[in-house]
Amino acid sequence: MEQLRHKDVWGGAGGGLSAAALICGGIMCLVIAWASVWNLFGQTAPAAFALLYLAVGLVVVLGAVILFRIVPSGSEVKFCVCLAALVFAARLAMVLLAPTRPESDFAVMYSAAQELARGNNVMNTEHYFRCWAYQSGFVAWMAFWIRLFHADVFFFQTMNCLCGAASGVLVYGLARRLASPGGARAAGVLYLLYPGSLLLTPVLTNQHLSEALLLAGLYIASGGEDKLKNRLLRGLGAGALLALSNVIRPSAVVAVLGALAVLLLDLFRWRELGRDGAFAAAVGPLALLAAYFAVTRGLSWLTAVSEINQMGLSNNVPTWKLVLGLNTDTGGGYSQADVDRVFTSSDPAAAERAARALLSERLAALTPGSLLMLFLEKIRSMWGGFEPLSWTFTPAVTGDYAARGLGETLQWCLDKAVRLASGIYIGETLLISAGCVRAAWRQERGRGTALLLTLTALAYFCAHLLIEVQSRYRTLLFAVCLPLAALGADWLAELVSAAGKRRKEISHD
């Protein structure tokens, strides 16, 4: 991975507002850590065991930082290859441990892909794809591999492993934009240790591919070329990748919002930057926005005219996520009662009208106090809860273990694993928070990239205050934030080094 020695494309971003945004990112991570500690101690008895899991998790994170900060630099290419191999191997082991079969929405999409590969397109008739036509992109992607290579569930699980390996290398590459080689290596290894995406690897969710494409878009966007032509090309390439990510799973819009926010922060400083500087700062983000919307619209049009889905890649019941997200009875989670009330016919327009009516009722009943309590409950459940196991260790998987006489052993291991994972998760979150503060406190190479990553994460965090929450959705935020842990690792190393020098001076005196 090339060591960057030139200016950050997003390096124009600076000033008080930018520092405030980075501090907000640090506060967000502290809130997530608080929610996780609250959950760990609330769900673990006695409290001494919770303290033990937390301590072990923190030691694991600290050990990874120390080890990869002191290991000689060596070849960055070799490290990337080793990191990718380790991430792939860990995820493949997870697939072999839990050979999950598709369930719920994943089963619907996999079945539709199988039908499409056989020449039977159900996406123009099935109610699911008439309401949420945007899922057609992922179905078409799976159908391509099924048609040409007879891909089965294990094939796509292996592809999830490859996406995880690519994401690990991209986390390292983004961290290298920000920090030292040692700090970047620590961030890459922390992605390897991050339990969320590891546990979801056997699940045929579109999150893995979508996140890899999103990270690739951010990596290209944050390159360090100063020439306007290169800024333009990078913006166009990044926008196209983010659009592809959004076609697979509609979440990359938060990265687009992050880029737009960086652009606005730069425009607030137009007098300081000057006309030429402001124009140069705007080229990359504007190209990204243009490419994102052009590719998104183009692929939606292509989906419609090819009749893969005559509705394109649209969301025809956009209010539904808000209906679920503002349900105080379920804490912003899934509600079968809401399903029964909204989806009373096969017409998506009727479902949208019913969703809007229900949303109006919810908004009318909410008070500032109840809304705040709902937000706190959603933060605790989505960001603080244990890693979700039900998607991976389905009844079929646990039943197979039980048939071999290993059911109780599996449950004991999983119970301990999620608590240890919570300790690791908390340690990584604290390190990311330190990285945000470091980026705000010191003007240095990569500060604009840190701002882009932080604003993307903040947009995702805030969106889930309003829409439906599931703890499996948090993998995207941490994939985006983990490069910032490299700055936290560097800062921690500097503090330890300064303390060591101070002790030597005192001892000498």
Image (tube, grey):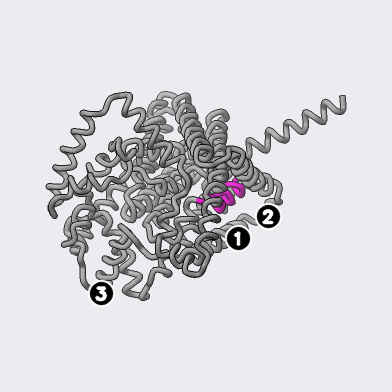
Q: Type of residue at label 3? A: Arg
Which residue shows up at 41% across the image and 55% down it? 390
Is 271 or 492 nearer to us in this picture?
A: 492
Does dot 2 land on a helix, a strand or a loop? loop
Q: Is residue 193 magenta?
A: yes
- Residue drawn at point x = 49 percent, y = 28 percent: 19
Q: Which residues are magenta?
A: 184-195
Q: In this orientation, does residue 466 appear?
A: yes
Q: Earlier in the sequence, mark 1 or mark 3?
A: 1
- Specify few, some or many for label 1: CA neighbours under 10 Å numbering under 14, 14-19, or 20 or more: some
Residue 279 at least partly seen: no
**Who is closer to the viewer here, 389 or 464?**
389
Q: Please tell me whether mark 1 sits on a helix, a strand or a loop.
A: helix
Q: Mark 2 vs mark 3: which is more N-terminal?
A: 2
Q: Nearer the viewer, mark 2 or mark 3?
A: 3
> CA–CA distance between discs 1 and 3?
39 Å
Mark identifier at residue 44: none
- What residue is pinned by disc 2? 74
**Disc 1: which residue:** 82
* Residue type (three-letter) at the residue carrying disc 2: Gly
Q: Which mark is residue 118?
A: 3
Q: Nearer the viewer, residue 225 or 199?
A: 199
The spot of residue 295 in percent (x, y) is 29, 53
Main SS class of the magenta portion in the image: helix
Q: Is residue 388 left or right of residue 323?
A: right
- Vertical arrangement, residue 409 with respect to residue 449, above or below: below
User: Is 451 situated above or below 149?
Assistant: above
- For residue 47, side relative to residue 122 (left or right): right
Residue 455 position within the rendered picture, expressed as x and y whole percent measured from the top left: 42, 36
